[in-house]
Image (cartoon, helix red, strand yellow):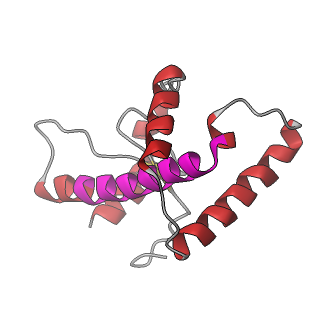
Amino acid sequence: MVDGMDIPYLILGDPAHPLQPWLMKNYPYDANITQEMYSFNVYLNKGRCVVKNAFGRLKGRWRILLERSEVEYTFVPKVVAACCILHNICEMSKDTYKADWQRSVEAAEEEFPQEEPVPNDYDNCPDTVDIRDHLML
C-alpha cells in the first residue's frame, strides 16, 4: 500500500513494452510530459538499470542461462532459482566477477536478440494508468 492505494508487485519495463497492471514503464517523452513525470521516469530508469545489471551478472556467472536449456522444461524454474541463490551467495561473499563473463553475456545478447514486444491496449487502461500516476506523486 502506498499512500492509501494498494500497489501490486511490479516489473520495471522499458518504453518499448506495453504498460500493464504488473509491468510499469516510463511516461512518454513528448510535449505533454510534466516535471513530475520526467522525475518518475528518471527513478524508474535507475531501477531498471540496477535490475538489468543484476541479470547480466547472473547470466555471466551462470552461463546455463545464456543458452537453450537441455533440461526438461518443468525443471527450468528450479535451475533458475538455484542459479539465483548461488549468485546471491557469490555477491554477498564479494566473489570476483570477471569481465570476460560480461563479454560472453553481451555476445550472446547480440547473437540471440530478444523479440520486440507486441503493443496492446493497456497503455490506456485506467487501473494501470492510475497506478503509475499514483506512484508518480
Left of 118 or right of it: where is 135? Answer: left
Q: Residue at x 49, y 72 (%)?
A: 94
Dominant secondary structure, magenta = helix
Q: Position of residue 37 (x, y in %)?
A: 21, 54
Residue 59 part of the magenta-drawn span: yes
Left of 45 or right of it: where is 66? Answer: right
Q: Would residue 108 be seen by someone viewing this image from the given angle?
A: yes
Q: Would residue 120 be seen by someone viewing this image from the given angle?
A: no
Q: Position of residue 5 (x, y in %)?
A: 46, 72
Q: Position of residue 125 (x, y in %)?
A: 46, 42
Number of disc labels: 0
Residue placed most toward the observer, 44 or 76: 76
Residue placed most toward the observer, 4 or 51: 51
Q: Residue at x 50, y 36 (%)?
A: 104
Q: Tell me the quarter of the image containing the C terminus.
A: bottom left
Q: Which residues are magenta?
A: 41-63
Residue placed most toward the observer, 79 or 93: 93
Q: Residue at x 15, y 45 (%)?
A: 33
* 93 versus 23 height, above or below: below
Residue placed most toward the observer, 118 or 125: 118
Q: Residue at x 36, y 52 (%)?
A: 49
Residue 132 part of the magenta-drawn span: no
* 118 versus 17 height, above or below: above
Q: Position of residue 14 (x, y in %)?
A: 38, 41
Left of 35 or right of it: where is 61? Answer: right
